[in-house]
Image (tube, rainbow, N blue to C red):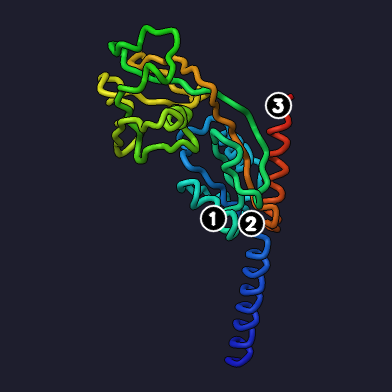
Amino acid sequence: MLYEKAHTALALIDEGVAACKALNSHCGRVAVGYEYMYMDQISVPWLQEYKDSISSHTLIDLVEQPLPQLFKGLLEERVDCVFVGLTKEAIIPAYLEKRAITSMEEVIFVGPEHPLAGRPFVTIDDLLDEEFVYPLIKPTSRESVVVRDFEERGKSPRCTTTLHQPSALNVVERGSAIIDLPAKYALESPHLVRVPYQSANQITYFFIWNRANDNESFAQFRTFVEEKIAALQD
């Protein structure tokens, strides 16, 4: 009797292990990379829509890293895809596949009492002596039109960083510094003034992935995103 019960228990354990293996084989993971996720007003709603429409067995894993690390992650297939805004398409390595989603200009946010607050627009000439503030890390000319314009003048913007976005915006509200953001960034505040920034450069927003990626879960996600891009560009 004891042997029969032990045999039955072992059989149930084997069935459970087999079921777990079967379940794991159907579990999918899609690693989606961002450099500055807080700036993204386009793909974040797409992610939520995709999450709501897929099986709970597919995990969407968000990865926020500097762009060089994201490109390395794509090459090593630790990251499946990247959403990023760039000032030059040539920044994207040739071994990666890309889809342009949209293009946008930048805007400058200043405090209500800042001297630039009443201007209809500003150019790089108006910003050369300004102090900038950014959350966490300073942007580079890869993703910031203002920084690229500074570099093309042979200069670098004077800037500081804060621990997070709200604290950076508080500095702007006080008039101690200004910040440049993509024009489609959904930021509305009675304590901030949005001033258009005119430049020969612009940001192009890309969906990027490694063409060698054979992750089936990512293939489904890529189809979803490409449909969204096509609809956005119609």
Residue 78 falls left or right of residue 157: right
Please state which of the two labelled residues, at mark 1 or mark 3, is closer to the viewer: 1
Local crowd size for mark 2, using a 10 Å CA cut-off: few (<14), some (14–19), many (≥20): some
Q: Position of residue 63 (x, y in %)?
A: 50, 49
Local crowd size for mark 1, using a 10 Å CA cut-off: few (<14), some (14–19), many (≥20): few
For residue 103, the mark is none
Residue 217 falls left or right of residue 196: right
Q: Do residues under tags 1 and 3 come within 8 Å of each other at their CB atoms?
A: no
- Tell me where residue 155 sits by quadrant: top left
Viewport quadrant of the C terminus: top right
Residue topped by disc 2: 28
For residue 72, the mark is 1
- Residue at point 57% right, 51% down? 31
> Of marks 1 and 3, which one's residue comes earlier in the chain?
1
Residue topped by disc 3: 233
Reply above or below: 127 against 204.
above
Viewport quadrant of the N terminus: bottom right
SS at mark 1? Answer: helix
> Of marks 3 and 2, which one's residue comes earlier in the chain?
2
Is 164 or 66 nearer to us in this picture? 66
Please state which of the two labelled residues, at mark 3 or mark 2, is closer to the viewer: 3
> Of marks 2 and 1, which one's residue comes earlier in the chain?
2
Amino acid type, mark 3:
Gln
Amino acid type, mark 2:
Gly
SS at mark 3? Answer: helix
- Residue at point 66% right, 35% down? 100
Amino acid type, mark 1:
Lys
- Residue at point 60% right, 27% down? 103
